[in-house]
Image (tube, rainbow, N blue to C red):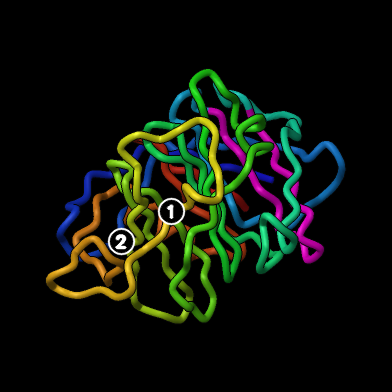
Amino acid sequence: IKVYRVAEPALSASGPAKDVTLSSVETFTFTYPDGAHNAESLMVDPKTADLFIVTKVSSGKSAVFRAAAPLASGVLQQVATLNFGTAPLSGGTLTTASDISPSGDLIAIRTYSSAFVWRRGAGMTVGVALAGQPCTIPQKSEPQGEAIAWSTDGASLYVASEGDPALWQVPVPGRASPSPSPSPSASPSRTASPSASAPAGPAVVRGLSTRVRWALGGALALGAALLVGLATWRFRVD
């Protein structure tokens, strides 16, 4: 697989979307250690700058591979295996997107129908964190959910679907004081329905930060490519 890295262009967080010509593209060529895989989920660790790819498998047995920073072409390292479709990762089996919070202490991975968050304690690797207990994120019903991204403050998740123009914001309760040991009772949730008097609930949102707009926009362009962001970098997987 090839991963392309480019410097993030200057865009207005509130302005309309527009095409931008990118320059100074870096190309990294990676090889899976066990043969070819289908994958639509890519995330970058803001603590280490390591890159992670989560495979998409009909059986639900997804491998998580790592490319260590500083990035250089080579063989990926498998750091975790996740079994989607069975408890505690109940629901759909096909992973479609992932992201790590800006502070690096929460990891989100979604399927078409479900989304999950893992807490990551101080000094914990992503692989070790993913071996812990996930929290289920209640989802808005979507026709083909293929995007997830953390807000810049790490207090909310944004989700979106192919074939649906709505962008939903899902707040994560208790985000101000995350615990390194998650439990089902600490699962992030959302309020019943959005309204002008209840902005904390899931709602269609506009004027996103540049980071979130790029992460979601790239995730919805999946199939042959995926765009995800870290600080001033963007990555694409072919």
Report whether residue 55 is seen.
yes
Query: Residue 171, percent across and down?
Result: 33, 56
Which residue appears farthest toward the right when viewing the image? 34
Based on the picture, tell me whether residue 66 belongs to the magenta stretch: yes
Q: Can you say whether 176 is above or below 161 in the image?
A: above
Q: Amino acid at mark 1?
A: Pro
For the stretch drawn in magenta, the main secondary structure is strand
Camera-side residue of 196 and 16: 196
Q: Nearer the viewer, residue 105 or 219?
A: 105
Up-down relation of residue 165 to residue 48 (above or below): below
In the image, what residue type sits under mark 2? Asp
For the residue pair 150 and 190, the one nearer the viewer reads as 190
Residue 136 lies, with reference to residue 113, above or below; the image says above
Mark 2: give few (<14), some (14-19) or many (20+) Cα within 10 Å: few
Q: Quadrant of residue 69?
A: top right
Element type where label 2 sits in the image? loop
Where residue 225 appears, as percent x and y from the top left, is 56, 58
Q: Which residue is mark 1?
A: 188
Segment tinted magenta in the rendering: 50-67
Q: Which residue is mark 2?
A: 19
